[in-house]
Image (cartoon, rainbow, N blue to C red):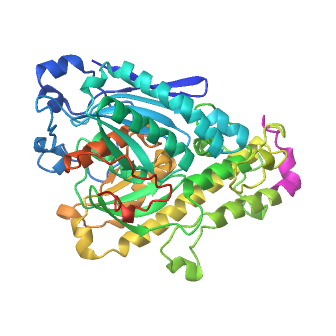
């Protein structure tokens, strides 16, 4: 039986269909449980990119072993966890089982609200969560078709994220857990992103493996050694790639969309055909029409193992200003974006943002979206290649692949360039094969509660009984310090 879930964005609802890619697990459950549940799959999403194809094998991965799926209180059925996510601007609730089934997922986003502020406004987002989290919980339970008596634990995002937003999910989870007598599990947001392929892949990676976390809050290369053991290998010096994408979209005055983030809109504009005068292959026309400089790619910067996007955003702003002064740029038809839709500094959130131009043509929007996306992707690929090549050969021999996760992992251009990078690198990793690439399904790249519930299941299977109610939120929380305050 299939089930339809939805992402609710403003007044619009984006639907998707999820069924289980693990039929053998579904058949192995008790008949009573099978009659009560509905099965979800990721058949709607692009398959994961991989430099080498391989069949599913239960013996290959520790998460594939049936012995790991234990529900101490109810041996006759899987462990069931309700997860809540509210770290930024997505209010999400999901119910997930230890047999890797997403029984329901409801995510209510704030893209329309964000567009009126020029970004995520912390207080406005917190107020929206207070209304959206209860709605998401109600819809999630109705979608799953189960009652509170069948849920074993409630999980929530402890951090990192915006403190006020985190607090809404935290208090909802603690109230439910205490009132209903359920176990409580606080989860690290980026750990959940990193471990999503263990939920969605038919042949998941074994530890150790590498993780490229690319989102609005993080741009890191991380070594995953166990469910709760991570080591940051590469970090950003300044802006994060997702934040840079969103600021660039606002700089280019790209029109907001109720169901898409600014970064996703920029990706769309970058994929559109070029318009005159930017379809001229002669790069000697104006300097502003050449590619943007790749950060940390020349002189001493080329030797530095780090990401950096602040300079790229500044370069985009300078080149756009130069191009707008060029006589030929005025020959293009104006975009539907007018000065009234451009965001003013007075409406922006507390973070500094570039100032959008008062007028900009659609030709410029397409051209500079492509320039920025190309430069940002080349920078990521360059530094990722350097970092992987600098790894200890013994470590490389033990790696089981590269997981790419976070909101920007949904960018199809980035996925394609990473696939090419893996083909060029020819690293000899675990079992003598090439590096494997893993991506979450597109619907699970952005913030969602399914990854929170799944990570809680992994922690509980590792021995966690329940987190205490007095654990503080951690808006700033490194993966290197994972759960170092848990008794």
Q: Nearer the viewer, residue 237 or 160?
A: 160
Q: Quadrant of the N terminus?
A: top left
Q: Nearer the viewer, residue 123 or 60?
A: 123
**Picture quadrant of residue 384:** bottom left
Whether residue 109 is visible, yes or no, is no
Residue 317 forms part of the magenta stretch: no
Q: Nearer the viewer, residue 331 or 359?
A: 359
Instruction: From the top left corner, tell me how far across and down residue 258 is, in percent.
Output: 62, 31
Q: Image height check: is 329 above or below 21?
A: below
Report the residue at 79% width, 62% height from top.
286
> Which stretch did the figure color magenta?
323-337
Instruction: Judge left or right: residue 393 versus residue 111.
Output: left
Report the residue at 69% width, 38% height from top.
115
Instruction: From the top left corner, tell me how far across and down residue 422 is, in percent.
Output: 37, 60
Query: Total number of numbered labels?
Result: 0
Residue 330 forms part of the magenta stretch: yes
Report the residue at 50% width, 46% height from top.
411
Whether residue 159 is visible, yes or no, is yes
Instruction: From the top left corner, tell me how far across and down residue 187 is, in percent.
Output: 37, 48
Q: Quadrant of the C terminus?
A: bottom left
Instruction: Judge left or right: residue 94 versus residue 312.
Output: left
Q: Image height check: is 55 above or below 437?
A: above
Instruction: From the top left corner, tell me how far across and down residue 181 is, in percent.
Output: 29, 32
């Amino acid at each position: 039986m299939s089930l339809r879930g939805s992402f609710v964005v403003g007044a619009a609802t984006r639907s998707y269909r999820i069924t289980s890619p693990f039929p053998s697990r579904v058949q192995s459950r008790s008949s009573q449980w099978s009659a009560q549940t509905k099965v979800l799959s990721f058949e709607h999403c692009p398959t994961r990119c991989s430099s080498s194809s391989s069949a599913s094998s239960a013996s290959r991965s520790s998460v594939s072993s049936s012995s790991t799926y234990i529900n101490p209180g109810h041996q006759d059925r899987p462990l069931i966890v309700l997860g809540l996510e509210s770290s930024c601007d997505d209010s999400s609730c999901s119910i997930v089982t230890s047999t890797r089934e997403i029984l329901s997922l409801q995510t209510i986003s704030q893209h329309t609200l964000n567009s009126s502020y020029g970004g995520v406004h912390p207080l406005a987002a917190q107020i929206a969560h207070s209304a959206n989290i209860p709605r998401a919980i109600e819809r999630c339970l109705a979608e799953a078709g189960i009652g509170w008596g069948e849920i074993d634990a409630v999980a929530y995002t402890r951090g990192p994220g915006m403190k006020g937003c985190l607090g809404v999910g935290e208090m909802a989870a603690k109230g439910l857990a205490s009132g209903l007598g359920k176990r409580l599990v606080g989860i690290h947001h980026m750990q959940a992103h990193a471990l999503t392929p263990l939920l969605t892949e038919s042949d998941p990676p074994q530890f150790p493996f590498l993780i490229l976390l690319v989102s609005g809050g993080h741009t890191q290369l991380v070594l995953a050694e166990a469910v709760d053991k991570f080591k940051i290998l590469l970090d950003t010096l300044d802006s994060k790639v997702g934040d840079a994408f969103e600021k660039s979209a606002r700089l280019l005055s790209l029109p907001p969309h109720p169901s898409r983030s600014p970064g996703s809109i920029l990706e769309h504009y970058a994929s559109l055909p070029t318009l005159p005068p930017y379809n001229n292959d002669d790069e000697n026309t104006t300097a502003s029409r050449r590619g943007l400089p790749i950060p940390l790619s020349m002189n001493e910067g080329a030797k530095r193992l780090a990401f950096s996007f602040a300079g790229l955003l500044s370069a985009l702003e300078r080149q756009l200003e130069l191009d707008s002064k060029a006589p030929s740029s005025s020959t293009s038809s104006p975009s539907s974006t007018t000065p009234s839709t451009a965001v003013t500094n007075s409406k922006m959130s507390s973070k500094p943002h570039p100032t959008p131009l008062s007028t900009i043509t659609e030709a410029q929007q397409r051209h500079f979206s492509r320039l920025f996306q190309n430069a940002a992707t080349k920078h990521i690929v360059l530094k990722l290649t350097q970092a992987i090549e600098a790894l200890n050969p013994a470590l490389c021999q033990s790696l089981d692949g590269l997981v790419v996760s976070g909101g920007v992992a949904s960018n199809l251009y980035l996925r394609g360039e990473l696939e090419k990078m893996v083909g060029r690198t020819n690293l000899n990793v675990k079992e003598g094969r090439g590096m494997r690439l893993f991506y979450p399904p597109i619907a699970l790249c952005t913030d969602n509660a399914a990854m929170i519930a799944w990570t809680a299941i992994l922690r509980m299977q590792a021995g966690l009984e329940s987190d205490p109610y007095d654990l503080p939120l951690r808006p700033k929380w490194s993966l290197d310090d994972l759960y170092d305050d848990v008794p």
